[in-house]
Image (spheres, grey):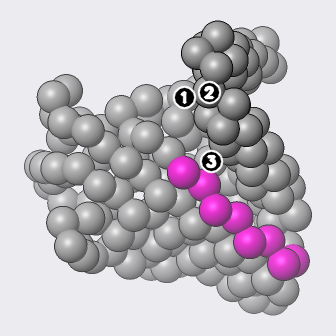
Amino acid sequence: MEERLSAQELLKYSRHDHMNTLHLIRMLLDLGKEDGVRQAIDAAVERARQESALGAAAMPRLAVWLLTFGWRFPEYEVSLDVSADGPGDKEADREAEAFLEELFTDLQEGLSPYAEYGAQIRVKTESGAWAVTFKLAGPHELHEGLPEAAPDARFTFEHSEENGQLKMTVAGRKVDR
């Protein structure tokens, strides 16, 4: 991502998300929906736990890219699931971030303003191995196909279509070169 968000922009987006959650809780309280309040609080706590777990992946640029995904690609309703049982590959960090930015910028060009889109993002790291899998719901019209990873990339890129969803995985393993 060439244009990185400034700290002020990151805080603005984060504050906006937190305010939305607080407004939802207040609305549910006003409506007397105590169960809804509990669910909203539990969902906010779980979202924060998942976001925090990205730090254990030790791939900071990829983590920031994933944390800001929903802000930069607002067409997608995002869910994040992180299992970081060890560091990924810090040396692949910048390259993976740049590839994902190119990939989603290309995908964004084929999105319909009238359709609903979802992005289930699964991150898994352990002992130098890492993978980020996207399951994308909604109609994705690919004008020129998806970009491919460079032959010398420190990761692989696989994609398929399953049950009307686009499934994409970017994965790698730390290798001493």
Q: Please provide percent x and percent y for residue 93.
A: 71, 60
Residue type at mark 3 is Leu
Q: In the rendered image, which quarter is residue 3 located in?
A: top right
Q: CA distance from mark 2 to mark 1?
A: 29 Å
Span of residues in magenta: 79-86
Task: Please check the rendered image and state whether residue 80 is part of the magenta-colored stretch, yes or no.
Answer: yes
Nearer to us in this view, 42 or 138: 42
Q: Which secondary structure, mark 1?
A: helix
How many numbered circles are shown?
3
Q: According to the image, label 3 marks what residue?
A: 66
Q: In the rendered image, which quarter is residue 4 located in?
A: top right
Q: Earlier in the sequence, mark 1 or mark 3?
A: 3
Q: Which secondary structure, mark 3?
A: helix
Question: In this picture, is 119 found above or below 152?
Answer: above
| Front disc: 3 or 2 | 2
Residue type at mark 2 is Lys
Q: Earlier in the sequence, mark 3 or mark 2?
A: 2
Q: Which mark is residue 71?
A: 1
Q: Residue at x 52, y 36 (%)?
A: 70
Residue type at mark 1 is Trp
Q: Please provide percent x and percent y for residue 116.
A: 26, 38
Q: CA distance from mark 1 to mark 3?
A: 10 Å
Q: Please provide percent x and percent y for residue 146.
A: 27, 60
Q: Which secondary structure, mark 2?
A: loop
Q: Which mark is residue 33?
A: 2
Task: Please check the rendered image and state whether residue 42 is part of the magenta-colored stretch, yes or no.
Answer: no
Question: In this picture, is 160 found above or below 176?
Answer: above
* Crowd rating for badge 1 (residues with CA inside 10 Å; few <14, some 14–19, many 20+): some
Whether residue 29 sits left or right of residue 85 in the image: it is left
